[in-house]
Amino acid sequence: MILSALLLATAQAADADPDCGSEELAQIELNWCAWKGAEEADAELNLLWDRIGGDMRARMLPSQRAWLAYRDAQCEAEGKMWEGGSAHSMIVGMCMERMTRARMTEIRNSHPEGPDSY
């Protein structure tokens, strides 16, 4: 929820989707790219989560809920030192993407048959 709101706010300020691979981006574009990366990672995590079935999903649900709260709190904490600055949104977005991708690795590695089983 926090992810979508910040991405929307950042995207509304930009005229068009920037080339996130470019080395010459304005801060607003860097913010947009960070949140776009976070949104894409979140979508990938949701797809991975959808592939987890049965007992495994039921066993993992409490930890997933706790992890989501932790991720959001951790990224807000990381962004606090940038609060009020133009890079705040970028810092939080980069954290969200980094932590979400790490969580996907944790989930894949938790499968008893190995990380390629999901």
Image (tube, rainbow, N blue to C red):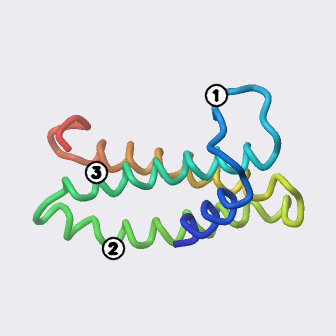
Alpha carbon separation for disc pair 3 and 2: 16 Å
Amino acid type, label 3: Leu
Location of residue 103 with respect to 54 vertically, above or below? above
Residue at position x 57%, y 49% from top? 36
Q: Which mark is residue 70?
A: none
Q: With 82 as the anchor, is 97 left or right in this view?
A: left
**Mark sitting earlier along the chain (3/1):** 1
Q: What element carries label 2?
A: helix
Amino acid type, label 1: Gly
Tell me the residue that label 2 is attached to.
Answer: 62
Amino acid type, label 2: Pro
Q: Are marks 3 and 2 in contact (CB under 8 Å)?
A: no
Circle 2 residues within 10 Å: few <14, some 14–19, many ≥20:
few
Name the mark nearer the viewer: 3 or 2: 3
Q: Do the residues labelled 3 and 1 touch (CB within 8 Å)?
A: no
Location of residue 23 with respect to 83 vertically, above or below? above
Q: Where residue 81 sits in the image (x, y, percent)?
A: 85, 61
Tell me the residue that label 1 is attached to.
Answer: 21
**Mark sitting earlier along the chain (2/1):** 1
Tell me the residue that label 3 is attached to.
Answer: 48
Foreground: 82 or 114? Answer: 82
Q: Where residue 98 sits in the image (x, y, percent)?
A: 56, 46
| Extreme residue toward the left, this view | 54
